[in-house]
């Protein structure tokens, strides 16, 4: 795996020029969003096409850009049930996008690992938030002390 040194106060995203990879990431995103295999191994009966339609319906959008800018932290704190669920699904899809990019050697490995992990974190955090909103009580995980 490639290594990277960051300057004080610099984030990983700021230190890597992803411009040469944007077309490849975009093509991979289109391929991912077109997948019709159910995500049953991840606990979803929906496939990626259905998730995309659901995201647009929840947010009242015509379409969305998987590589667009989304403020997961803000939605976690102030979002509606619909926006929390939609961004939960976007985070899920983005986690898989960067896992696939890593596997297919598209873009810097270190960035793909980081981006996949961050989006997996937000998927799980937003999923818990959605369930807490749905059932009007916090989600408790017995395996977490």
Image (tube, rainbow, N blue to C red):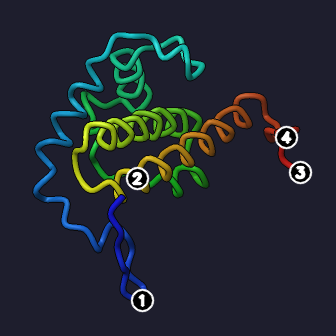
* Location of the N terminus (image quadrant): bottom left
- N-term-proximal mark, 4 vs 2: 2
Mark 1 Cα shell of 10 Å, populated few (<14), some (14-19), many (≥20): few
Asked if 37 appears above or below 55 in the picture, the reply is: above
| Cα–Cα span, label 3 and label 2 | 27 Å
In three-dimensional space, the C-alpha distance between marks 4 and 2, rounded to whole angstroms, equals 25 Å
Chain-order first, disc 3 or disc 1: 1
Give the answer, above or below, for where 122 lies relative to 63.
below
Q: Is residue 16 above or below residue 125?
A: below
Q: In this view, does 19 lie above or below 119?
A: below
The residue depicted at 58 percent of the width and 50 percent of the height is: 76
Secondary structure found at label 1: loop
Percent position (x, y) of residue 77? 61, 55
Label 4: how many Cα within 10 Å (few below 14, some 14–19, many 20+)? few
Which residue bears the numbered disc 2?
Answer: 115
Circle 1 is placed at which residue position?
8
Give the quadrant of residue 65. Answer: top left
Label 4: which residue? 143
> Is the residue under label 2 in contact with that under label 3 (CB below 8 Å)?
no
């Amino acid at each position: 795996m490639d290594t990277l040194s960051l300057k004080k106060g610099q984030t990983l995203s700021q230190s890597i020029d992803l411009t040469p990879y944007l077309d490849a990431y975009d093509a991979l995103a289109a391929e991912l969003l077109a997948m019709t295999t159910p995500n049953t191994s991840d606990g979803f009966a929906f496939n990626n096409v259905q998730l995309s339609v659901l995201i647009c319906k929840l947010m009242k959008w015509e379409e969305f850009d998987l590589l667009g800018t989304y403020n997961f932290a803000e939605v976690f704190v102030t979002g509606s049930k619909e926006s929390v669920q939609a961004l939960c699904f976007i985070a899920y899809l983005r986690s898989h996008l960067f896992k696939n990019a890593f596997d297919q050697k598209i873009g810097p490995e270190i960035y793909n690992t980081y981006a996949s992990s961050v989006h997996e974190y937000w998927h799980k955090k937003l999923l818990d938030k959605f369930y807490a909103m749905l059932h009007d009580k916090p989600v408790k995980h017995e395996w977490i002390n």
